[in-house]
Image (cartoon, rainbow, N blue to C red):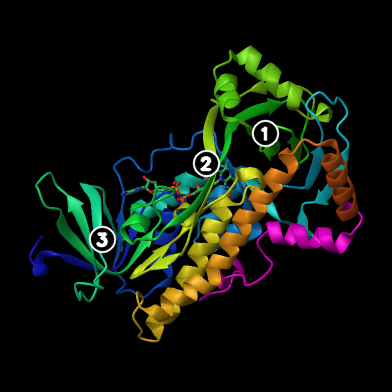
């Protein structure tokens, strides 16, 4: 271990610069005071546009507002497709006519879309541009992050972050009042803090691909619930669409190994007949789907954000949105805590974060889990019941309004930055 005086001290050490971690770094650097020292720990090449190539996100109005508050939305807006309408169907693959059981208007108020579909590269480029220009964020990409001393047993006044440099013992290179784990589903911060997880494998993969439509989509998103899992058609600019297609694990690998013609044939079988046939645009990829929930979102001098805290089924496109809500809430708490002169890694701040964010993470994860299980159950009696339930919701405007606002991230205890309010 290094002599204490050689260990660099930061207010916050953020491990993981995926989109949630990178936005957290920007948010903290923008809204905290000038003296705030922020360290971001990542692997080399973390900002490569090839990561998550072909993936698109359904970003809610709340997430859009956070991006606007960070000065990022202007660069994203020209390439973001507002969702004007959403159709939900529930039928077997062979069914030619897929009746729409539930239809939503996409706007939460006149001229205010509840969500936008945005491609990964479109979102990532301005975020990483701004990250690399930020004066008060130190980015460290050398060596492997290999341990965390949180100071509880050793009586340290701050957490120490250890790194492997090839020698026998790991070196403590940095100290921080608070360590933020934004290091994804396999979070090492979570492991080092001794936080256990609840996991459940869906035995499904999400196939992600972009297609060109032969007819205008008019901003309509479609969610076909098929017996193998949801098949989502998310409209993109220039009459393209991003498909998020859930299949049993083995089938997804087989689909992705098909020739382009065979693959597009399978897509067209599942596609909305009203939208016509489609052509491939870009590469296809498939990702294993599982539920992951940290048993606590905090540990000694540690908080978890994004997929490190909660990994949800992508059927409602909420993963990134929940992560951005973590960021906005955490920024608000840390700014207030510092203004009060309190310890940002202390119990008061951490408990506030846990109370605010854990129920949202848990409820979202189990809501997606329940919907996935309900809609992949094949019994015809269940299908009838689902049809009845969806039609019932369709006839209840206040319930529909609630769902649209929920998906737009404007219901409940919304952090100030997601309401466009300064902190
Ligand atoms: C098929 C699919 C479709 C999806 N569609 C949507 C959608 O429409 N809308 C939506 O909101 N969400 C969607 N999601 C979810 C969304 O992609 C994730 O919730 C989001 O990417 C999580 O971001 P993150 O930054 O928390 O984690 P990650 O993107 O996993 O980033 C973690 C980062 O931590 C770094 N890291 C890890 N370990 C270390 C270490 N030891 N040291 C240093 N750095 C480390 C990694 O290099 C990485 O950059 C989808 C997910 C899937 C699988």
Q: Read off the magenta span.
A: 394-423
Q: Residue at x 29, y 74 (%)?
A: 35
Residue in front for this viewpoint, 187 or 284: 187
Between the residue at mark 1 and the residue at mark 3, the CA separation in whole angstroms equals 43 Å
Q: Which residue is mark 3?
A: 148
Q: Nearer the viewer, residue 364 or 15?
A: 364
Which residue is labeled 1 in the image?
Answer: 241
Is there CB contact under 8 Å for labels 3 and 2? no
| Residue name at image x 58 percent, y 60 percent | 362
Q: Circle 2 sits on which residue?
A: 120
- Residue placed farthest to the bottom in the image? 340
Mark nearer the viewer, 3 or 2? 3
In the rendered structure, the answer to whether residue 317 lies left or right of residue 86 reads left
Q: Earlier in the sequence, mark 3 or mark 2?
A: 2
> Which residue is at a point 26% across and 48% down the rendered structure image?
141
Q: Label 3 to label 2, Cα distance in Å?
A: 31 Å
- Judged left or right of residue 256, residue 92 is right
The residue closer to the viewer here, 369 or 52, is 369
Q: Position of residue 75 (x, y in %)?
A: 53, 49
Callout 3 secondary element: strand
- Mark 1 touches mark 3? (CB < 8 Å): no
Q: Identify the disc placed on residue 144.
A: none
Give the label, 1 or 3, closer to the camera.
3
């Amino acid at each position: 271990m290094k002599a204490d005086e050689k260990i660099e001290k930061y207010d916050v050490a953020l491990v993981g610069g995926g989109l949630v971690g990178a936005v957290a770094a920007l948010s903290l650097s923008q809204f905290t005071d000038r003296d705030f020292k922020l360290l971001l720990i990542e692997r080399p090449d973390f900002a490569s546009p090839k990561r998550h190539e072909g993936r698109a996100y359904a970003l809610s109005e709340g997430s859009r507002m956070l991006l606007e508050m960070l000065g990022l939305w202007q660069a994203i807006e020209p390439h973001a497709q507002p969702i004007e309408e959403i159709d939900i169907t529930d039928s077997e693959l062979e069914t030619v006519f897929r009746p729409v059981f539930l239809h939503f208007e996409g706007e939460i108020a006149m001229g205010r879309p509840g969500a936008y579909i945005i491609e990964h590269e479109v979102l990532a480029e301005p975020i990483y541009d701004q990250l690399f220009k930020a004066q008060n964020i130190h980015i460290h990409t050398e060596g492997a992050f290999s341990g965390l001393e949180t100071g509880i047993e050793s009586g340290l006044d701050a957490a120490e972050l250890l790194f492997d440099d090839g020698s026998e013992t790991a070196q403590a290179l940095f100290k921080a009042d608070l360590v933020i784990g934004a290091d994804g589903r396999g979070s090492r911060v979570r492991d080092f803090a001794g936080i256990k997880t609840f996991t459940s494998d869906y035995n499904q993969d999400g196939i992600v691909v972009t297609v060109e439509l032969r007819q205008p989509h008019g901003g309509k998103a479609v969610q076909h619930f098929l017996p193998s899992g949801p098949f989502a058609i998310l409209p993109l600019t220039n009459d393209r669409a991003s498909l998020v297609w859930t299949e049993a694990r083995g089938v997804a690998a087989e689909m992705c190994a098909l020739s382009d013609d065979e693959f597009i044939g399978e897509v067209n079988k599942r596609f909305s007949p009203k939208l016509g046939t489609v052509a491939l645009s870009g590469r296809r990829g498939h990702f294993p789907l599982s539920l992951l929930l940290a048993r606590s979102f905090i540990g000694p001098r540690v908080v978890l954000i994004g997929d490190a805290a909660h990994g949800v089924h992508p059927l409602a496109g909420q993963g990134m949105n929940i992560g951005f809500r973590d960021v906005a809430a955490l920024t608000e708490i840390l700014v207030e805590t510092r203004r009060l002169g309190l310890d940002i890694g202390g119990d008061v701040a951490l408990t506030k974060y846990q109370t605010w964010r854990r129920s949202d993470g848990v409820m979202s994860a189990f809501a997606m889990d329940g919907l996935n299980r309900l809609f992949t159950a094949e019994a015809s009696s269940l299908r009838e019941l689902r049809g009845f339930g969806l039609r019932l919701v369709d006839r209840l405007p206040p319930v529909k309004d609630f769902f649209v606002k929920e998906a737009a991230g404007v219901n409940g205890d919304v952090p100030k930055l997601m309401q466009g309010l300064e902190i």
